[in-house]
Amino acid sequence: MSGIDQATPRGVEDMRAAVEQLKKSLAGRTDARAVSMLANADWLIRKSVWLIGGDGWAYDIGFGGLDHALASGRNIKALVLDSEVYSNTGGQASKATPMGAVAKFAAGGRPTMKKNLGGIILTYRDVYVAQISLGANPQAAAKALAEADAYDGPALVIAYSHCVAHGIDMAQGFERQKTAVETGHFPLFRYDPSRSAKGFSALELDSKPPSKSFAATASEENRFKLLLKRNPEHAVEMLSKAERFYRNYYDRLEDLTTCNW
């Protein structure tokens, strides 16, 4: 069993099979050592510890705890379902709410940019960080989750999550996820510190440069459309500013993919 590498899903399955064989061989034995081994056999299988929560927890009220966990160096994984709003408590603005979006406590549109949680955690350099979107790139999403789980250390995966508070037809949720990626609003990337030791850039992009205008497509969601109706001039100014930021941020991410850092 000591020769089984549990860093991959296949390795974990091999260990599970080996443990089952061990348990069968120990069944019926009454000596203290066998009884103890049988009681603890399942602990030989590598366990995944995942924290799962929304952006209200991760970006706001629970950020200190999340930051502490990820900075610990422990093998802890976190999955953030980022709906960009406090969904469970009625749709209040959170630090994940994008500029120009209307929400409770942001009736005039959120005036500042969304908190860059992924970018903040990247600065630790030893934390696996990824942004994923099932609607835009399901293959990259599956790869990121597998890599995060296998990474020997803390990992953060941020998943774009469409929400009824966006004011969309929920049947088109995956299409809206795709649009968020295509406008640069939510770029997809995987940052794996272990790649640096192999001479590769730790950062890989899973989305292409913005191909659609964020300002032009924002009106397809009520959270932006409301402000365009109430205060068109102000809305256009904010959405255009957000679009410029998204395009510049993607350029910075592209630059980082050329570095071994």
Image (cartoon, helix red, strand yellow):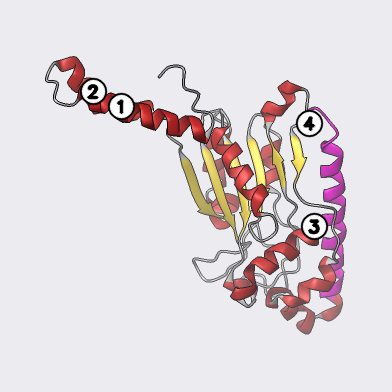
Q: Nearer the viewer, mark 1 or mark 4?
A: 1
Q: Residues within 10 Å of mark 3 (few under 14, many from 20)?
A: many
Q: In x, y percent, where is residue 217? A: 80, 72
- Contact between marks 3 and 1 (CB within 8 A): the answer is no
Q: Residue at x 70, y 41 (%)?
A: 190
Apparent side of residue 75 relative to residue 233 in the rendered image (left or right): left
Q: In x, y percent, where is residue 232? A: 83, 80
Say whether disc 4 or disc 2 marks the residue closer to the N-terminus. 2
Q: Nearer the viewer, mark 3 or mark 1?
A: 1
Mark 1 → mark 4, Cα distance in angstroms: 41 Å
Q: Which residue is mark 3?
A: 184
Q: Which residue is mark 4?
A: 201
Q: Which mark is residue 25?
A: 2
- Give the residues in magenta: 234-261
Mark 4 → mark 3, Cα distance in angstroms: 21 Å
Q: Tag 4: residue type?
A: Ser
Q: Tag 3: residue type?
A: Gly
- Contact between marks 1 and 4 (CB within 8 A): the answer is no
**For the residue labelled by badge 3, is the local secondary structure a helix, a strand or a loop?**
loop
Q: Residues within 10 Å of mark 2 (few under 14, many from 20)?
A: few
Q: Which residue is mark 1?
A: 21
User: Toward which corner of the image does residue 253 lie, by quadrant?
Assistant: top right
